[in-house]
Every structure is written in C-alpha cells, then in structure tokens.
Amino acid sequence: MAAAQSVSVPGRDLLAYPVGLIAESGALPNMLGLGTYNPAAAWLPDGARWRLAAGSMNTAQDAGASAQTFGASARWRAATISLAVTRAGVAGLVRTDSDPLTVEDDIAYYTLVTSLGVAYRASPHVTLGAATRYWSGRLDTDARSRAVVDVGAVVDHLTRFDARVGASTFLFSPGGGAANPPTWLAAADARVAGRDSLREVRVGVSTSTTAGRPSEDFVYGSARIGIWELRGGPVRTTAYGASNLRGRLALAVHYAGYAVGLAREETPSGLAPTYQFVLSSAGK
C-alpha cells in the first residue's frame, strides 16, 4: 500500500501556505477555529455550542496555487469535536513533450487533508487536543496517502496581560520517516493595552519548522476596537540556506456571532501578493 511506504505524499509544499489564517498563529486559537494546525485551538469558548467556518487562499497567477478549507465543530459533553477538510493545488501545469506544444491533459498537482479532532479543557488554563487525519496527494500519475496523528495544547489567561502559549504538531506521520517529517509549531502572545477582548492591543511571536523544509518566524500585532480588528507583522522564511522577509496584513470584522477576515501577504521575487479569506460563525 502507498500509505505504508516511507515516501513523500505529493503536495506537501502547498501546505506551507498559512491556509485559513488571517495574519495569526496556527498554534493559538484563530478565526477559523477548526484546529487545522493545533487540535486544541478548536475549543469552543463558553457560551458557544457550534461553529461553521470556511476559508480560501489564492496566490499570484505566476504560481497558480489555491487552497480551500471548511468544516464544523460542536460541543459534545465536556469536549469540542471538530471536522475539517483542507485542499490545496496548482492549476494550469501543462504537459509538454520534446517541444513546447501542449499535449494531453494538464498535470494534476494537489493535496487533501481530512481531519477529525477533539479538544478538551483539562483545567481553567489548559486545553489539550488531538486529531487523526487522512492525508493524500497527487502529482500527475503519482498518488499517495497516509494516516497522520497530531496533538497540541493551549495555555491561556496567564497573568494580568492575558498571555497565551500554544504548541502542536502538524502532519505527524508514525513510520513516515524522513520523507514525511512533521511540522512543529509554537506561539505566544499577550495583551499590552486595553481592558478586554473587545478593546485591546496584543503582540505575539509564532514559529514553525519542518526538518529539511522551509521554516517560518512571524512577529505580529493586533488591535481591536469593537467589531473592527487590524492585524499584521513581518514574516521571515528560511529554506535551503536562504531567507526572505515579507509582510502580512489583515482586517477582520466581528459582528453578531460572525467573523469575516481578509489578509494580504507579500511574496518574494516581485510576484503579486497572496490573499486569504475566512468566514466563521459560532452559535449558542
């Protein structure tokens, strides 16, 4: 079986994009709220019984990559159960023979991750989470898949600054070997001004690293006044001995249980920016 072989699942590089994140950390609770990068981040806050969310990502036409993610979470007894699907792919990869003329169909290149997670409030300050995922990908005629398992934790409401710390794995593949290394994520943020979550300024730092693949460091800030929230900061990506620095900026609106966010991220080499969109709704 392909899943049992220690070979790489196609499309892993597409999951390096922060799909579903609006200038925020995947290791901490975020607007999408489905636990895509940290299963513990899917925990529904007090007063919420369910959440529906969807997001999309589009790169410059030069790259041709796009991604979509959607899912739902709900309270079940003392836990939050989440189900999410994320797909990322590249369109327009033409097939050529010995000359530049296009022949046959375009080359298929995509990856798909289906996740079922559970988050549990272990104490007033600690949330633990775990998720099982089915990860598949295709590059032309090469199609492979694996079962992966991820874990994560979030520690919040620390000190008078309402500090939060999160850590998790992403695509941890038992027996996957060097061909399928997991991504390790960690982040921390705190309130530096304001009195509550409706009127505050926060600053934070987030990092993610994958053996033999690009790593990312993100220093960010957010300011919220009522329904409006502005986020952003510099991102540094390091890969194969080289690094680049670019900016992320996002605007979010929170109203009547809905949250809508739009983010813009610069890209290196003078390419057009990447855009992210997220819509989330929580109900009682």
Image (cartoon, rainbow, N blue to C red):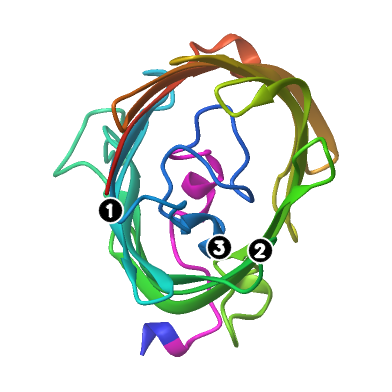
Please tell me which residue lies in front, 99 or 238. Answer: 238
Please tell me which residue lies in front, 235 or 38. Answer: 38
Question: Residue 47: x, y in percent?
Answer: 38, 50
Residue at position x 66%, y 63% in the image: 124
Q: Height in image: 91 above or below 27?
A: above
- Res. 186 visible in picture: no
- Name the residue carrying label 2: 124
Q: Nearer the viewer, mark 1 or mark 2?
A: 2
For label 3, the crowd category at 10 Å Cα-Cα, with few meaning under 14, some 14 to 19 and many 20 or more, is many
Report which quarter residue 78 is drawn in.
bottom left
What's the amino acid at mark 1? Gly
Tell me which numbered mark, 3 or 2, is placed earlier along the sequence.
3
Q: What is the C-alpha distance between the residues marked 1 and 2?
A: 26 Å
Callout 1: SS: strand
Tell me which numbered mark, 1 or 3, is placed earlier along the sequence.
3
Residue at position x 62%, y 48% in the image: 28
Q: Nearer the viewer, mark 1 or mark 3?
A: 3
Magenta span of residues: 4-20
- Name the residue carrying label 3: 40
Q: Height in image: 246 above or below 241?
A: above
What's the amino acid at mark 3? Ala
Residue at position x 65%, y 80% in the image: 177
User: Principal SS element in the magenta part?
Assistant: loop
Q: What is the C-alpha distance between the residues marked 1 and 3?
A: 15 Å
Please tell me which residue lies in front, 155 or 231. Answer: 155
Callout 2: SS: loop
- Name the residue carrying label 1: 71
Q: Nearer the viewer, mark 3 or mark 2?
A: 2
Question: Residue 161: x, y in percent?
Answer: 81, 35
For label 1, the crowd category at 10 Å Cα-Cα, with few meaning under 14, some 14 to 19 and many 20 or more, is many
Left or right: where does residue 185 sit relative to residue 159? left
Q: Height in image: 77 above or below 31?
A: below
